[in-house]
Amino acid sequence: MTTTTTTTTTTTTALVLNRINGPFALETVSLDTLRPTEALVEIHASGICHTDVSFATGTIPTSTTPAVLGHEGAGVVKQVGARVKHVVPGDRVLLSFSHCQDCAQCQDGHPAYCDAFVPLNLRGKRLDGSSVMRQGAEQGGKTLFSGFFGQSSFARHVLVPTSGLVKVPRETDLALFAPLGCGLQTGAGAVLNTLDVQAGKSVAVFGAGSVGMSAIMAAKMRRATTIIAVDLRPSRLRLASELGATHTLLGDDADLVSKVREMSRRHGVDYAVDCSGVPAVVAAMV
């Protein structure tokens, strides 16, 4: 794909969602002027998260279209703003959510709970209300809902607040590591940081998608003795076993609760992680 850069804008291509439940269209778009704390990143790989699908279908309600989604991006830095110090053009980077770096939560090492998380990541524009991305003239130059989770990685090039940029070694396989920006860090973070799972303990993971698999791998890293994967799909349970689950159960098993107890010395597991978001699953887990 070709990219044209001027002193004020970068013209690139993106997958644009013009209406909820509509198709994604490959369009020419324009990026705004690079700000001092932003970087221009050429996207080399992007995961597709269920959250992207939920926004596109309206399951997560938003009336803001046209939009450019995507939030599991990885690529190469092309330009940096005047105040950017930790990356330079040519660096390979992984992208994640934006955070202000100044509030109490950020200062305490909890950027996911940033006071400005919602306006920085979910409103489709900068904090000052300006747009990061616009459609091309053939679509009327409309403002695009963009900067999704600090990224909008369904574009060839993006302007990214550098709080969400992580530099990685030059030999890093960007396609393999792109999901670290959301799915992998969500599941693994729950086990490593939120629950702080200890060696020799038991863990049950409900839902064996990408987030659940990440939780299972993290539990194995922490040397949990019993790791139970629960899902409705046998194929996922087989993969869970390969990634570290010591036991697997089908989620629709009528004896699910009693079997979990049997697998965990009859007193229930020490830790449980829900990766499904389904209320009935949470009720069974508790």
Image (cartoon, rainbow, N blue to C red):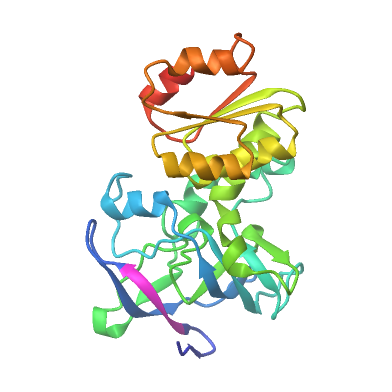
Write the residue at 50% across / 56% down: 127
Main SS, magenta residues: strand
In this picture, is 87 found above or below 202? below
**Image location of residue 147, percent across then percent down:** 47, 62
Q: Is residue 187 among what the camera can see?
A: no
Q: Is residue 129 among what the camera can see?
A: yes
- In the image, the segment drawn in magenta is 11-16
Write the residue at 61% across / 51% down: 99
In this picture, is 53 found above or below 154? above
Q: How many numbered marks are there?
A: 0
Write the residue at 51% across / 84% down: 8
In the rendered view of the protein, which quadrant contains the N terminus? bottom left
Residue 108: image quadrant is top right
Q: Is residue 133 magenta?
A: no
* 160 relative to 88 in the view: left or right: left
Write the residue at 68% across / 72% down: 92
**Image location of residue 252, percent across then percent down:** 36, 26
Viewer-nearest residue: 90 or 266:
266
Viewer-nearest residue: 32 or 149:
149
